[in-house]
Image (tube, coloured by chain):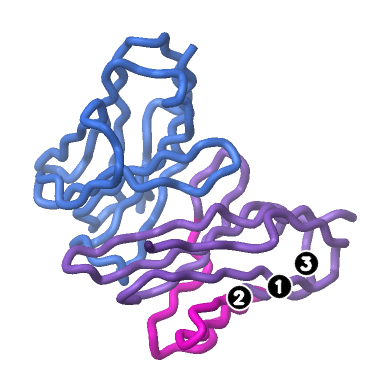
Amino acid sequence: KNQVEQSPQSLIILEGKNCTLQCNYTVSPFSNLRWYKQDTGRGPVSLTIMTFSENTKSNGRYTATLDADTKQSSLHITASQLSDSASYICVVSANTGGFKTIFGAGTRLFVKA
Amino acid sequence: DAGVTQSPTHLIKTRGQQVTLRCSPKSGHDTVSWYQQALGQGPQFIFQYYEEEERQRGNFPDRFSGHQFPNYSSELNVNALLLGDSALYLCASSFRGIPLYEQYFGPGTRLTVT
C-alpha cells in the first residue's frame, strides 16, 4: 500500500534553532518527492521537489534530502524564524501508468520567541 | 501573473444540500486537481481534470463530481452534503498533468456543513 508517514507529528523549537523533519514512504514506483509549507487556513506552498537521482536540494534556509534506497527524506530548517511556524507536508508521487500523488499528514512546527 | 484562485473563501451549508466550488488555474496551466483537507490532516486527492475530462480519481464517492471548462477553470460539486464533508477544499493547477511539473495550490475554500 502506498503510504507517506511523517514525524514528528508536531514540534516546538525556539527562534534561531535548527530542526529536522522526517518523511518515510512506501510509494512505488517512485517518481518524485516534494516538501510543502502550509500556513494555517492557506494552501500549501512548494519548498523543494526531488527526483530519484537527487540527494539534496536547498531553498534558502530549507534543505531537503532524499535516500531513495531507504525511502526516507528529511527537511532541515536552519536558523528558524517565527514565520516558519506552519505545517510541513511531504508529498510523494508514483508513476503507476497514471500518476498517483500521496500526501503525508504533515508536521506541525511551532517556533517560539 | 495571477496565481490559483478559488471561490468562495468560506461557505456554510446544511446537511443534504449541494455545493459548487470554483477554481481558476495559474496562467499557463491546463490541469486542475482537487483535494479535501480535514482539520489536522494532509490533503486527500479527490480528482484531476485535464482537457475537460476527469483523468484520475481518488477514493471519494460519486457525490463528488467536477467539471473543467475550455478556459481550464474547474468546478467541484458535492451533492447530499454530510457533516463529514466539512473541510478545506484545495485546488491545485499544473501543466499537462505530469506531477514533476510544479503544482501550485490555491488558498482553499473552507466548507462547513451543519
Is A111 located above or below residue B25 in the figure? below
Q: Which residue is mark 2?
A: A74
SS at mark 1 in the image: strand
| Rendered location of residue A14, percent (x, y) | 88, 61
Chain A drawn in what color? purple
Subunit under mark 3: A
Task: Please state the extent of the stretch shown in magenta in the rendering.
Answer: A45-73
The residue shown at (21%, 30%) is B62
SS at mark 2 in the image: strand
The reply to whether discs 2 and 3 touch (Cβ–Cβ < 8 Å) is no
> Is tag 2's residue or tag 3's residue first in the polypeptide sequence?
2
Q: CA distance from mark 1 to mark 2?
A: 6 Å
Q: Quadrant of residue A30?
A: bottom left
Does the segment drawn in magenta span residue A52? yes
Q: Which residue is mark 3?
A: A80
Circle 2: is it few (<14), some (14-19), or many (20+) Cα within 10 Å?
many
